[in-house]
Image: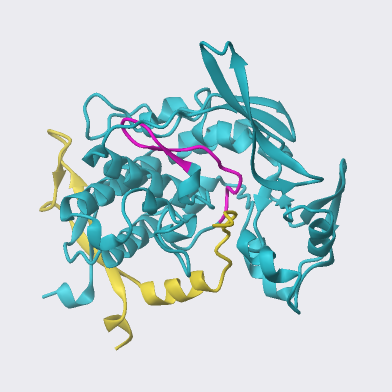
Amino acid sequence: MFLADTHNFGQQVKRVQQGTDALPCFYFDKPRSVYWEWLFFGQTSPLKNIFEFKSRDPYKTLSNYLFNLDIEILGKWRGRSKEVVEWSGAITNEHFYAFGALIAYCYIFGIRDLHKQNLIKTESHFQVVDAEVVFTRLILPSETLLLPFKHIGYELSGIGVFANNKSEHTLEQKQEIIDGYMDMFSFVIDKKNQIDEIFSSLKLDSHPIRVIIRNTSEYKSILESNEENILKSELCQLSRGDVPFYFKYLGRSELLWLSKINTESSELVPDLLIKDVDRHALFYSIGWCESVASERMMATGILCLRKYFNIKDDYIFAIGDSAFSVQAPKDLK
Amino acid sequence: MHFLKSNLILKIKWLRSSSNKGINPIKGGYMEIVYIDLEALEAEAESHNAGLSSAG
């Protein structure tokens, strides 16, 4: 019944059954904010209509690959999400295309921690089912963890749902990922004013955004070592049996944690962590997309994918009345 | 030498054709080269925490 780690005084995600045994329906009861899952992946998200735009499959829109979660927000620190049932069929090229679109979407909106356990296979795509870390200013798409990053390889990163290593991908599959990335990114650039209008109409700054200051796996050994830079609040949470949980509110600098069940306390961030903490939960008065979703960022992602998959092709994309050709200097004649 | 390590994008400003809304690379187009040092960005990204909640 209990799933995942314990946070904030022993609370855990629980899988609960509704309906009858003959016709069961399962939900995940989450003792944390589900607001961000609702906003970025929920069936009733106000963003959904914007993404009702045809993808390369004429019968699908980009929103088909994102907004599928049945979310019920029960409070600031509690919500429910209907279980996404894993599809048992084979992976198709559409899954790769949708994965590329997801990379662009999460890169733009700073959605992180998308390891493969947070993705469920559906008939057309892999659905994100957990999103707690959002609005992070990312440098590279791999920081979403949809792609390998630092020491995290195929065994944990999102792309590990497809293969055990990148040599298993065909050229066609790699191209599908890049096509999906380019379609989604250029679409968001085109619609950035509409998306920012949606954001500005919502009270985004009243919902906690998780900040993972240390990989959870590191806590396994941290109590046994003489780890420097461990925060007192980390030790406090570990001693009560919790995996340390930190959060921020959009546009505010304080790093917060729950020192008591209903008490939010501020933690002084040491120099070693401040650079990373500061780029989380950012707010831009002129709008997130206006500030972040640039042609340069899109090109950076293409370069990153091109290098990762060892593809030498140039890529051309058009936005408005401009066209962009992405290539390496050595390719220039 | 620095740019040999870099990647780049060529931004080509194309004017829209007034007749068919297509893009016309001939009329009034210009080209701008923007360099992106991917290796420097990779190094900067690596300086941040991976942010992985899974215990593996």
Q: Residue at x 62, y 47 (%)?
A: A285
Region rendered in magenta: A119-136
Q: Nearer the viewer, residue A314 or B9?
A: A314
Q: Colour of chain A?
A: cyan
Give the prevailing secondary structure in the magenta stretch. loop
**Rendering coords of residue A233 (x, y %):** 83, 61
Quadrant showing the N terminus of chain A = top right
The chain letter corresponding to yellow is: B
Left/right placement of residue A211 relative to residue A91 reads right
Q: Seen in the image, is A17 located left or right of residue B3?
A: right
The location of residue A51, given as percent across then percent down, is 39, 31
Residue drawn where x is 43% and y is 25% of the image:
A49
Determine whether A28 is above or below A96 in the image. above
Quadrant assignment, res A275 = bottom right
Name the quadrant containing residue A229.
Answer: bottom right
A57 falls in the magenta region = no
Please tell me whether residue A321 is drawn above or below residue A138 in the rendered image. Answer: above
Q: Vertical placement of B17 versus B36: above or below?
A: above
**Of all residues shown, which one is farthest toward the front?**
A21
